[in-house]
Image (cartoon, rainbow, N blue to C red):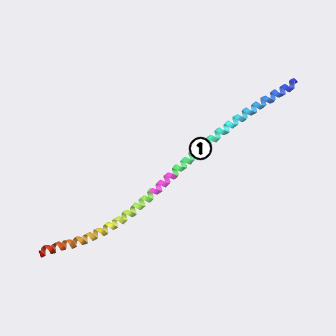
Amino acid sequence: MSFEAIASIAQAEHEAKAAVAAAEGRSKQLLSDAEAAGRAAVEAAGSKAEEELAELNRQAKEKAKGSAKALAGELENQKAVLRSRAEARLEQAASLVVERIVNS
């Protein structure tokens, strides 16, 4: 082979090695970028999930407070009804006791 052919082949090999090295560097950079983007997406999803959980927790607490207030109101009404019935029966019982004492 002539010197020019050998030099041309050596130049082509050198350019090929440089192209491979550049491609490897680019692929490493793309992989690194993809990993960083993936981590950022996971972090964003985690943050969004935490925010949604906090909102759902707040809504559940609000609903529980409303339910507790409604239940407390119902219980107060029941208590008042029971108290009035008991007071009426107390008066009847007192009258009955007085009547039995007087009649005995």
Tell me the quadrant of the picture where the C terminus can be found: bottom left
Q: Is residue 6 above or below residue 36?
A: above
The stretch drawn in magenta includes residue 37: no
Pinpoint residue 78: horizontal percent, then vertical percent.
Answer: 33, 67
- The residue under the point 69% across, 34% down is 25
The quarter of the picture where the N terminus appears is top right
For residue 44, above or below residue 22: below
Label 1: which secondary element:
helix
Q: Main secondary structure of the magenta part?
A: helix
Q: Give the amino acid type for the residue marked by disc 1 in the picture.
A: Ala
56 lies left or right of 37: left
Q: Determine the image quadrant of residue 13.
A: top right
Which picture quadrant has residue 100? bottom left
The residue to which callout 1 is attached is 40
Residue numbers of the magenta segment: 52-60
Q: Residue at x 86, y 25 (%)?
A: 4
